[in-house]
Structures are given as structure tokens and as C-alpha cells.
Image (cartoon, rainbow, N blue to C red):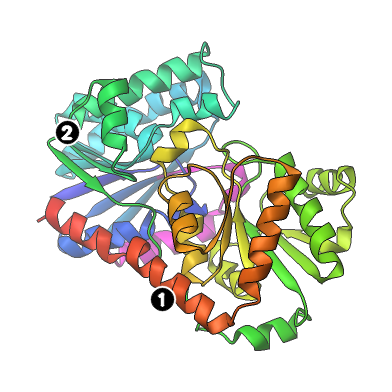
Amino acid sequence: MNILILTYWSYKDALVQSYTLPYVRIIRNQNPSNKIFLVTIEHPFHKMNDEEWQNESNKLEKENIELIRFKYDYFGLKMILRILRFIPKLVKLINQQSIETIHAWCMTAGGLGYILSVLTGKKLIIDSYEPHAESMVENGTWKKSSFKFKLLFWLEKKQSNKAKTVIALTKGMANYAKTKYNAIFDNYYIKPALVNMDRFNWKVESYCDIRKNENLENKIVCIYAGKLGGIYLEEEVFDFFKVASSFWGEKLKIFLLTDKNKEEVDALIKKKNISPSCIETQFVTHEKIPYYYQLADFAINPVKPVPSKQYCTSIKDGEYWAMGLPVVITKNISDDSSIIEEEDIGYVLKELSDQQYLKACEKIDALVNMDKKVLRQKITTIANKYRNFTIAENIYKEIYK
């Protein structure tokens, strides 16, 4: 049973490297003799040259995984026209390669999966099933009257009623699908964003030694690895940094690992009157991320606290927890906000205000002054409970048995 896996991300994007490929390999292990075809898109920021692409393709080919790519455009009419030109090639591939299952990652790729399933009659599975169209409206990226919203919401409804099997990020997504899409599923699984506990392991390197090498011995180190804007806060992140820099003074060091234009980041630092030496901004490839986490004392996850985010999980929290880091997070984000509050492993911002940012700093200060080994062991135990890959292994074993 060959499988076509659809994504809406570039191969080099962390969403493929850490959020898709590990699961693809778990699926691969269920049926080693059958082939997986992995579709990615090529965003200009993550573009690979022909040599890089060939090297990665050759590596995956040894695992019986064939890599496919097409060019990226922002979701809209231009991207739809590009996808429409690509659909005949995928239909031909499905028929020629005896593909029995179309496995789409998230609901944007699920729209393409729905069209292919209708055209070929093949089974459709939606993985990482979460609302996207309403989320884009809630975070201010789209308007509800826009063509983009109407199209994606329609595709979300269609794919939800077409797919008999979905793998959601939260239990509550089933009620959302029933209410919004009038969809009820034969097979409903829950798989939050999981983490490779071998790669994200705070015991791999010596916390003290690497902090010494980076001249961070007497610092309080905050880390954020992710985007600014879109589903994430932007100006508010720097408002928090401003309060944190006032609270800790020169002891504070922030690593901001983002693909945001450095000039724009510098402008925000200047606007908020934060010392430039306090923040180090750079883009870091995903394989290097654990090293920077190892330097940190705590992390932030500034997801915009909009209603649809209660149905999503962020891989960042799992990675932070696996590295033993307490987290400052916004309210009502998946189950993560309640886990952080109930387990006392960070701070949940009740609102976006200087008063709450100060309370977060006070809580983090109390936590980081605990015994480092005890704190990290507590947090990694929670990571193993909620974000271990054994959850995915059990689900895919059931689906692809």
C-alpha cells in the first residue's frame, strides 16, 4: 500500500524537519516494503539549490521515500492556479504508483488531498487536524469576507466530511468539527505535536560548560525560536522583553531565533527602548536549535490567544519541556496552558499587559533559582508523558496495520 503524503511547507522548514519527517519515518516502519511519496513546496526563504535537493532526495530514497516539490505562493488565487496545474501530475502518480492512501498534513494540504481523493477515489487521512481558516481571521491576517477565508473554510468542510480518519491535536477538535463542518468521523485519534526526546535532551551537553563557553554563567537566558506575526504575537513580545530587561537588568540575555527581517527586529528593539546588547537575533536551522535551548533558563511561546488555538498544540512547548525549560505562554493554548499552570512549570499570561509580564518574570525567577537538576527532571518527566513519540507509533500502527 503506497502512500502519498501532502504538506504545505518547504522541505527545509522546521515544520517538515521536526513536525513531519519523524512521523513519515514511523509510518514507513509500519510497511517497510511499500513506498512513500512526500510532497513539499519550495518557499523562497528555504529554497535549496539543485545539489542540495538531490542530496536530500538520495538520502530519502534509501528509506524508500521519494521527495516531490513544487513552487510556493501565498494561499490565494495564484497558488490555486499553480496547484491546479500540479494536480494532473499527482493524479498520474497516484494511478501509476498504486497509491492507496492520501495522507495530508494539516488542513491547507488537506484541501489538495480532498481534490485528489475525489478525482482518484483513494482514502483520505487528515493529520494534525486543526482549524486554520478561522484562526487566520482571529489573528488578523485575513478578513472573514475575503476570498481566501471562504475558499479555505469550504475546503476544510469538504475534507472533514470526506476523510473517515483524522488525527487531531486535541480531544475538543471533534466538537469543533461537528459544530463548524457537520462532520463526524469513523476513526478519531489524538496526537499533539510530539518531540524526539533523543534530540531534545538536556542531558546531552553540560549546561554549565556550554554557558561558560558562551559567557553566560551569571545570566538569566530567555529563548524564543519561532516566527513573529501571523499566529504569533509581535510587538507584545518586545513589550515582554522590555519588562524582563527592567526586572533582571544586565543579567538578562535573550536569544531570538527567527526568520524575521533583522532590520524590522532592530526597529522594534529601538521602539521599545531595549538595550540592543540584551537581544541576539538570528535564524538558526532546526538541527542547531537544541544547542541554543541548552543555553537557556526559560522560554516563551507567544501564540496569539485566539479561540481556535485551544484546538492546536505547539511543537515549541514540547521541545522546551524536553529540554527542561519552564515556559511563559498565553492563555487557552491547546492543553498546554493548563498543563503549565497545573504542573507549576512556568507562567500563563492572563492578559497582555506589563503587570502580567512582571508577574511572569517573578514566577520564572523563583523557578530558575531552584535546583536546576530537580526542575529540569520534573519538566522532562511531563514532556515524556504528553509529547513522547510512542503516542504516534501506537496511532500509526492502528491506522496502517
For residue 51: magenta?
A: yes
Q: Amino acid at mark 2?
A: Phe
Q: Is residue 377 above or below residue 308?
A: below
Q: Nearer the viewer, residue 377 or 136?
A: 377
Q: Can the viewer see residue 336?
A: yes
Q: Tag 1: Cα neighbours inside 10 Å, few (<14), some, or many (≥20)?
A: few
Place of residue 116 in the rendered image (x, y in percent of width and height, measured from the top left): 25, 29
Q: Can the viewer see residue 400?
A: no
Tag of residue 173:
none
Q: Tag 2: Cα neighbours inside 10 Å, few (<14), some, or many (≥20)?
A: some
Q: Looking at the image, tell me whether mark 2 or mark 1 is earlier in sequence order.
A: 2
Q: Quadrant of the C terminus?
A: bottom left
Q: Residue at x 75, y 83 (%)?
A: 217
Residue, disc 1: 198
Place of residue 212 in the rendered image (x, y in percent of width and height, measured from the top left): 73, 86
| Distance between the alpha carbons at the discs numbered 2 and 1 | 34 Å
The chief SS type of the magenta part is helix
Residue, disc 2: 185
Q: Is residue 145 above or below residue 158?
A: above
* Magenta highlight range: 40-64
Q: Nearer the viewer, residue 265 or 303?
A: 303
Please indicate whether residue 96 sits to the left or right of residue 52 in the image: left
Please indicate whether residue 187 sits to the left or right of residue 292 in the image: left
Place of residue 398 in the rendered image (x, y in percent of width and height, measured from the top left): 13, 55
Q: Amino acid at mark 1?
A: Asp
